[in-house]
Amino acid sequence: MDLAAGFPSTDRDDWRALALAVLRKSGVEAATPEEALASGTFDGITVAPLYDAADLPGAEPFERRARADTGWDIRQRHALADPEAVLADLTGGVTSLWLVVGDGAIPVAELPTLLKDVYLDLAPITLDAGTRTREAAEALFALATVRAAQSGSTQGGSTQSGESAQGGGSVRAGGSVRGGASVLSGNLGASAVGPGAVGPAVAAELAARCAAEFPGLRAVTVDATPYHDAGASDAEELGCSIALAVANLRALDHLGTALAFGQLEFRYAATDDQFATIAKLRAARKLWARVADVCGVESRQHQHAVTSSAMMTARDPWVNMLRTTLACFAAGVGGADAVTVQPFDAALRQPDAFSRRIARNTQLLLLEEAGVGRVADPAGGSWSVERRTADLAERAWAWFQEIEAAGGVEAAGELISGRIAATRERRAADIAHRRLPITGVSEFAHLDEKPLRASTAASANHEGVAAPGGSPPEAELPVIRYAQEFEELRDLADAQPVRPKVFLATIGPVAAHTARAAFAAHLFHAGGLATETAGPGTDPEQIATAFAVSGATVACLCSSDRLYGEHAEAVAAALRRAGAHRVWLAGKERYAGVDACLFAGCDALDVLRTTFRDLEVTA
């Protein structure tokens, strides 16, 4: 059946002609629509406005993969020894546990109590214990031995309950409580290299024991999230992960190449840029398949996707629910085997029962109601996704080769830190100029939001995902959040006895000044600054009087270009006489008496910091 029958045939040139005509009517001058509409990534990949079959990188089946129609493993992270929270997650639909063990997290000695009512044969356990991995692993092994002995005389069953019929994932337990044979599965979270690593000998010992005694248990986690949390691009995160994985392979190779490959699980960050995340996970499998091919083995990459810590905000944290939903969807579509959705309040406090429930239900809705996990590879064959996957894999492989040429991931620490720092600075510039807007922070800030109270139990902010285990070999890598610079200004403004204020000197009728007044207000609100408007009118003295009454010392002219030409200089002079320390103008035109301009694409952080200095607001 030809669905296009009866329609005239078209090609890319036809689209170009039509698109270019529309752009020119809109005042956009460009030689091609791609020139006007294409965008770029931090890896130098061009994201085109249109793709067709000519963009496909190769012959089918491209990067398709098979996955059971049960979907993915819902993996919830816990950093406190709270058995009730663990059971609430498992009975609510979580299918595996990610336990942060060590100082400031779950004490090793508390593991038996924490897992007292958990079916170890149904709920896989992933440890994140850094240098204490061996100690935590021994505690887990000992618990498994006790459970195995108990199961010889008493056999239990499972209880399934919660907010969904089943939890979604490769385990599909839908809730696991004590009983049954203690057959461990999951990951011990060891690493052979880098700070927080247990070293090659211990990593190899744990891998050998897993292979011999617990075939469902892996020993090594190749954690790429610290690179992401330091500001790395997608290709940089991927290239570093492959280099880190190869370093672990070398440490385990004496056990046998196939066994070494089977002991590795990869952890990647999933962001609210859904197509970038889909392409990243697909490219990761492509890269690892290449490594396996070179080593002469067949090995599928096992992926654990975690919603990005860097993208999370402390301000207007409810928006994080939208971010993590997009990231979870992208991780599922991208083919992740396990997904962790961070609670929406993770940047603020230790997540509570409500935020953990929202996190797991995000996955349950996507799995059970949307059916995302029932499709093997939804993005497979997509012209745009296949092209982006191939381009990303190519750049990541080149970066991996560069790291290897520098001596491997440990020897190339300075190279890696420098490259990520450069990307971090470019992203920071885009955020400062609001080319990468952050809803609720750099855009549409809500000054009157009621902050969530931080838990006294622990701060559990974004750093908690990478600590105490999961450290990359580059100890100097920072941990950032994209919103942090705007949020620091918000915190400073909130700490003042009276909220600092900027006066919007609106000129002319409402219809003439509203657009620019709203733009200026949103910008100043992003720094926690209140705004007060003059209202309609053109009389410089009336506007200056309203300014004096407001108590502000900084003003911003807001109106149309035509009215600026008629009144801007006179109003600026009147504001100066009334005591204005600085006069901004919303727009790009320059006039006498105006210090600087606000406009789309200006450095909003610089504007805000300058305004704080003018208002004499300091920490």
Image (cartoon, rainbow, N blue to C red):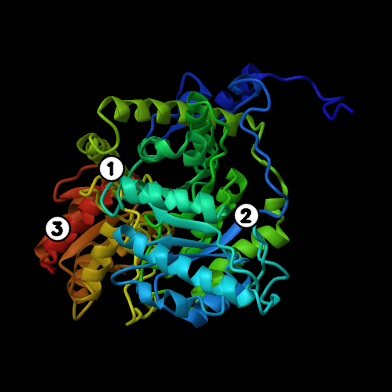
| Circle 2 crowding by C-alpha within 10 Å: few under 14, some 14–19, many from 20 | many
Q: Secondary structure at mark 2?
A: loop
| Circle 1 crowding by C-alpha within 10 Å: few under 14, some 14–19, many from 20 | few
* Label at residue 582: 3
Q: Are marks 2 and 3 in contact (CB under 8 Å)?
A: no
Is residue 238 visible in this depiction of the protein? no
Residue in the picture at 32% in, 45% down: 200
Q: Which residue is mark 2?
A: 72
* Rendered image quadrant of residue 167: bottom right
**Number of the front mark, 2 or 1:** 2
Tag 1: amino acid: Lys
Tag 3: amino acid: Arg
**Number of the front mark, 2 or 3:** 2
The N terminus lies in quadrant: top right
Q: Secondary structure at mark 1?
A: loop
| Circle 3 crowding by C-alpha within 10 Å: few under 14, some 14–19, many from 20 | many
* Label at residue 588: 1
User: Is 356 in front, or is 603?
Assistant: 356
Residue in the picture at 60% in, 72% down: 119
User: Is 505 in front, or is 196?
Assistant: 196
Tag 2: amino acid: Trp
**Relative side of 276 to 158, left or right:** left
The alpha-carbon separation of the residues under discs 2 and 1 comes to 51 Å
Residue in the picture at 67% in, 41% down: 377
